[in-house]
Amino acid sequence: MTGTPIPHAPGFIANETPRIVTARFDHEDSHTLERYEATDGYQALRKALQRTPEEVHSEVRDATLLGRGGAGFPAGVKWGFCPPGVWPRYLVVNGDESEPGTYKDRLLMELDPHQLIEGCLIACYAVGLSQCFLYIRGEMAVAQERVAKALNDAYDAGYIGKNILGSEFSVDIVLHWGAGAYVVGEETALIESLEGNRGMPRLKPPYFPASIGLYGQPTIVNNVETLSNLPWIVQHGAAAFTAIGTESSPGTRMVAVSGHVKRPGVYEIVNGTTTFRDLLYGADMCGGIRDDHELKAFVPGGGSAPWFTPAQLDLPFEASQVGPQGSMLGSGAIMVMDETTDIPAAALTLTKFYAHESCGKCVPCREGGTWLEQILRRVVEGRGTPRDLELLIEVGETICPGDFPHAAVPSEGIEAVPFPYRMTTICFVGPSAFAPIHSALTLFREEFEAKVAGNEHPTMIEVAVDV
Amino acid sequence: MRFFNDENSSLAQEIIGRYPKPRSAMIPLLHLAQEQEGWVTDEAMAEIAELVGTTSAEVLGTCSFYEMFKRHPVGKYVINICTTMSCALMGAGDLMKHAELRLGVKSGSTTVDGMFTLEGAECQAACTEAPCLQVNYRHQYRVTANQFDELVEELASSDHEVPEHGVLSQIRQHIPENRSVGAVPPEDVATAPVWLTENGGNQ
């Protein structure tokens, strides 16, 4: 144990999969310019500069590169939403990774910052973005150091700034960093934060900051992993990218598997075809549940995602199949619960997260999240009543009216309600506070009932008064 | 009496100059203030307001939104123990109880000698390395009770490289003058960037 900063972030486990974004991770010096240049680094940029911006844009559109931040929107299509003739346009890099369970963007920033920088440059060239802001989460001191060093080196080497590699292409990349707020990962909140404001999401429409974003200008907001794919796509071509995975979900994805598995870690997997079972039980991946316990449930796509049970293990990493089954792939984060897990208590660890992280702009989220946390806490602590279980649903429905997405359990006759949810809030933070409660209550109601059995009235706290 | 020392004053100007609008420098400048003083003082906020052209109330508005900005003195080392799902599943609750006993303070408080502030934190993006914690925003992975004790002893001695609270990245971005494109207010840009028009397109 040491108090010094760990130079090499752990977490990544190499497996057989084609390696697109993690190809350099095995090298101790993967973050340096020397290593990057020695392994094809900045070759994609050179290649891009020999083609027209439209050609580069088409290549990315043809690759069907789905956004890796959570929403899964195709990056090439998003780029096309910039209104013609409105200048300047900006690029904002979303490196504010903080969705519960998610651990990949930090690895990409710490272990291969030049790959991200090259991705930013390709995006700026293709879409005509005249300045790039690389927003890194405040709590990531090491990532900030690695990216700052990489930016300085890339500027000195002529890859960033005026007349890049002697071309007409000129762009600055500015390192920006946050100060601790989950909601800033929402792209309009990210822009508010970058403008020096409280990080609250903007009212929609417009749905995409590509039309009105930073300083009211067209702005592309892309996730770190999304941008990190670009050098490979430009270097090898869209056809090579779509040859991996499926037609609607090509390429690879970085997925963090945490919780009760034998080998928790971050894996780069083939998109679209790899199943949850491959990932959780595969010998070259997580290797099964810890101590050979039974799997009870898992969160498939970050803390906001409705939960799955062993009944969904054979679903592939394919949005079109996971959605109708009641959840989402989100940010590539799987949290695994084995048979020993206290389900209501596990749900509480997520609900309190979203209650804590509510920005306070929308009343249903600000008030509802806190209520959900308080009611659930008393249930978990054995102070709740059967009525509290109904109350949880009632409060949840003020945030998300109507049927809430949840997983189907064929053996128990529960029909899937497909993702997404309807909501009374601007962003997903509010519904996310309800998602774990709804999933847990739908799938494991008996555990909640056991905790409130026999409690007719809320237990009052007895206060001893000495006079 | 200025708040920022000479070095940080010129650094502040450099940072502001990178943005098309000065207000965008607000969060980096609040970090710079916290780096200088260990926390964000009223004097710092007043000066930042002047630097970015707004009021100190606006600066307080932004400052108070973000968890990392402390508006009162905290320990030399802020220890954040993650309490969100993956860490909770792997024993973060016990680790927090142990930390409270070891440091003799409840989560959210600072030890009397001013060395440590203990906080429960939300997800720190190290979920596969649970339970994890951060010391001044530098990660420690798969922390056991014994390792926590060793960490505290090491921090209390001077044999480590963790900088004092407030210091984040120890490497600063530097844009060389001869390479800088420069930040232009958006209202001063009316045309497509030259590399788009050179290539005959204007998307």
Image (cartoon, coloured by chain):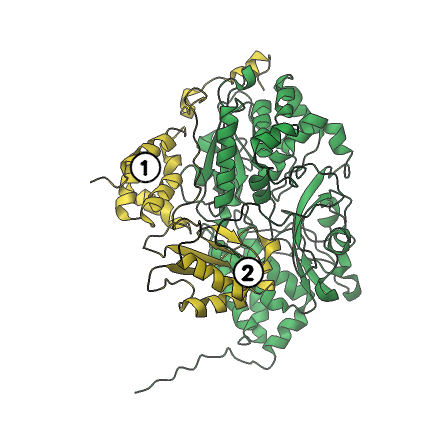
Q: What residue did someone put label 2 on?
A: B143
Residue A308 vertical placement versus A112 (above, below): below
| Chain for numbered disc 2 | B
Depth check, mark 2 against mark 1: the one in front is 2
For residue A397, what is the image quadrant? bottom right
Is A257 placed left or right of B66 in the picture? Answer: right
Q: Colour of chain B?
A: yellow
Residue A275 vertical placement versus A90 (above, below): below
Is B48 placed left or right of A65 in the picture? Answer: left
Residue A47 vertical placement versus A446 (above, below): above
x, y percentage for residue A291?
72, 66
**Mark 1 falls on what kind of element?**
helix
Residue type highlighted by circle 2 = Val
Bin the neighbour count of mark 2 within 10 Å (Cα to Cα): few under 14, some 14-19, many 20 and up.
many
Which residue lies at the image location 59% right of the left edge and 27% below the top edge? A123
x, y percentage for residue B188?
41, 20
**Mark 2 falls on what kind of element?**
loop
Looking at the rendered structure, whether the residues under marks 2 and 1 are on a common chain is answered as yes
Q: Which mark is residue B8?
A: 1
For the N terminus of chain B, which image quadrant? top left
Chain with colour green in the figure: A
Residue type highlighted by circle 1 = Asn
